Image (tube, rainbow, N blue to C red):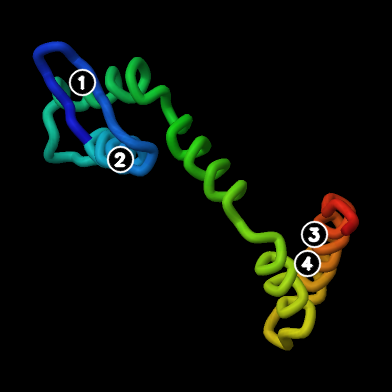
Amino acid sequence: MSYSRENNEVSASGEDMVNAMRGYKATLHNPRVSNEAKQHAQDVLDNEIHGNKPQQDLYEVRQRNKEPTRVASGLKAAQQNPRVTDRGKKQAGDQLNQLVEQQPEE
């Protein structure tokens, strides 16, 4: 992540943007930070990082890269796990059914 105060540019990968967002949010909640620094952090979050958008984008990319076979295996395991609540088992079953419906037949 690179940030240049002179030309107010933030250029970074998705994960770097998420880390930058976390840092600026921490600045906003830190009582030892000056009001000027807090205002700057808020400006960067609003104008350059665009709030939670980097986090949402990174989540979407990670969701697309998951292997359906492994996801299905995890959902099946959740249904058999005695530490999972009945509600959790039902949700896992519902998600598994959705996953099966979405898969093209071979």
Which residue is denoted by mark 4 in the rendering? 92
> Which one is in front in this view, the residue at disc 4 or the one at disc 1?
4
Mark 2 vs mark 1, CA separation in Å = 19 Å
Residue type at tag 1: His
Q: Are marks 3 and 4 in contact (CB under 8 Å)?
A: yes
Which residue is denoted by mark 3 in the rendering? 95
- Which type of secondary structure does the marked residue at label 4 adopt? helix
Q: Residue at x 13, y 34 (%)?
A: 33
Mark 1 vs mark 3, CA separation in Å = 42 Å
Quadrant in the picture for residue 83: bottom right
Which residue is denoted by mark 2 in the rendering? 16
Q: Residue at x 33, y 25 (%)?
A: 45
> Which one is in front in this view, the residue at disc 4 or the one at disc 2?
2
Residue type at tag 3: Gln
Q: Are marks 2 and 1 in contact (CB under 8 Å)?
A: no
Q: Which mark is residue 3?
A: none
Residue type at tag 2: Asp
Q: Which mark is residue 40?
A: 1
